[in-house]
Image (spheres, rainbow, N blue to C red):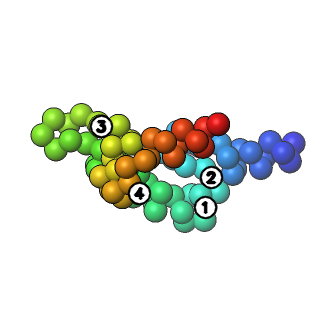
Amino acid sequence: MLEFVRWYNHQHKQSGLKFVTLAQRHDGKAKTILRYREQAYGAARLPWSGTLVSFDTKLERLFGYRGVHDYFSQLRR
């Protein structure tokens, strides 16, 4: 039972809390996470079309890093 409670509080993202965990909400981290998410989605949106560009392109734009796709490909291995 304790294992389930830990998972539910620290790993399970709650849809009613905009997909943050109960622990993140309790610790006050939820506002920061949601603010960052909003900025990331805003940067991914093309201002003239309202469509999303790939996250690789967004990261390149934000950080000027060209090898983002290769970097994340290596992480998946």
Residue corresponding to mark 1: 26
User: Residue, x 38% and y 54% (percent of image)?
Assistant: 65
- Whether residue 38 is visible here, answered yes or no, is no
Which of label 1 and label 4 is nearer to you? 4
Q: Residues within 10 Å of mark 3 (few under 14, many from 20)?
A: few
Which of label 2 and label 3 is nearer to you? 3
User: Residue, x 29% and y 36% (percent of image)?
Assistant: 52
Which of label 1 and label 3 is nearer to you? 3
Q: Earlier in the sequence, mark 2 or mark 3?
A: 2
Residue corresponding to mark 4: 36
Residue corresponding to mark 3: 53
For this view, does 39 lie left or right of residue 5?
A: left
Q: Earlier in the sequence, mark 1 or mark 4?
A: 1
Residue corresponding to mark 2: 22
Q: Residues within 10 Å of mark 1 (few under 14, many from 20)?
A: few
Q: CA distance from mark 1 to mark 3?
A: 33 Å
Using the image, determine if residue 15 lies above or below residue 30.
above
Q: CA distance from mark 4 to mark 2?
A: 18 Å
Name of the residue lying farthest toward the left = 48
Label 4 sits on what residue type?
Tyr
Instruction: Indicate the position of residue 56 as horizontal and vertical percent values.
Output: 39, 42
Label 1 sits on what residue type?
His
Q: Earlier in the sequence, mark 4 or mark 2?
A: 2
